[in-house]
Amino acid sequence: MLRRRARWLLMFGALLLAVSSSGSAQTPAPGETRVYATMLQLMRGVLYPASNVIFTAQADDPASFKPALRPSTSSDPFTSAYGGWEAVENAGLALSEEANLLIIPRQCGNGRPAPVKNADWLLWVQELREAGMAAYTAGQVKDADRILEAAGAVADACLHCHQKYRNVPGGMAARCQ
Ligand code: HEC
C-alpha cells in the first residue's frame, strides 16, 4: 500500500516537473538563440575537450592512433570515424566556433555577468579564434611543427584570459571582474 502510494507520488511529481518546465516563459521561439550554460560550464564542457585534442597532438603523432573497435561511436576523437589528423582539424574549427560562444552574454559560475564586452576579453577571444584556425590549418597539412606552434598559441589564448579573469586571489567568488 505504502509502496503504491510512493509510486503514485513519484509519477505525479514527474508530471508536475514536465508541465512546469514546458511553460512558455522558458521556451525560446524557433530561431531565437538561448543560453544554457554558465561560463564555467562552457569552459568545462566545450572548450576543455576541444583544446585537449590540440594539446595531445603536440606530444602524440595524430597519425599513430589506431581506429577504435567501433570508430563510429568512439568517444576519443583520435580513434573515431573522423580520427587522426582530421580530429585536429575538427578541434581547431571547434575552438574558433566556440570563441563565438564566449561573447554571448552569460553568467559566470559565481553569478557575476561574464565580462564579455571588455576590450581585453575580446582581444583574448580573438586570439583563441586565430589559434583555432592555425590548428585547423596544421591539421589540414598534417604538419608536426605547425601543430606545435598552434598548440602554443591556443595555450597562450587560454592563459592570457585566465590570468586576469580566472586565476585570481579570492578564488571562485572573485572571478570574472
Ligand atoms: C576570454 C577569456 C577566456 C578564454 C580565452 C579562455 N577561458 Fe577558460 N575560463 C575563463 C573564465 C572567466 C573562467 C572562470 C569561469 C567561471 O568560474 O565561471 C574560465 C574557466 C575555465 C575552466 C574551469 C576551471 C574550473 O574552475 O574548473 C577551464 C577548464 C577552462 N577555463 C579552460 C579553458 C581552455 C582550455 C581555454 C583555451 C582553449 C580557455 N579556457 C580559454 C575565461 C577564458
Image (cartoon, grey):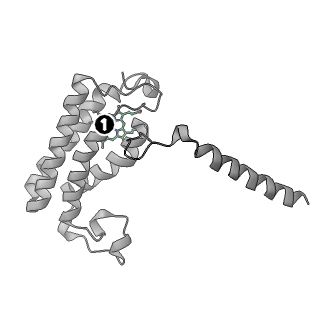
Q: Which of the image's four quarters has the C terminus?
A: top left
Q: Name the residue under label 1.
A: 102
Q: Where is residue 89 in the image (x, y as percent from the top left)?
A: 18, 58
Q: In this view, does 10 lie to the left or right of 41?
A: right
**Could you say which is closer to the camera, residue 34 or residue 94?**
34
Q: Is residue 145 left or right of residue 95?
A: left
Q: Does the residue labelled 1 lie within 8 Å of ligand 1?
A: yes
Does residue 151 appear anywhere in the picture?
no
**Could you say which is closer to the camera, residue 33 or residue 2?**
33
The quadrant in which residue 138 appears is bottom left
Does residue 120 appear anywhere in the picture?
yes
Q: Which of the image's four quarters has the N terminus?
A: bottom right
Q: Where is residue 168 in the image (x, y as percent from the top left)?
A: 36, 24
Name the residue at 29% across, 69% down: 79
Q: Where is residue 133 in the image (x, y as percent from the top left)?
A: 15, 48
Say above or below: 148 vs 29: below
The number of numbered badges drawn on the structure is: 1
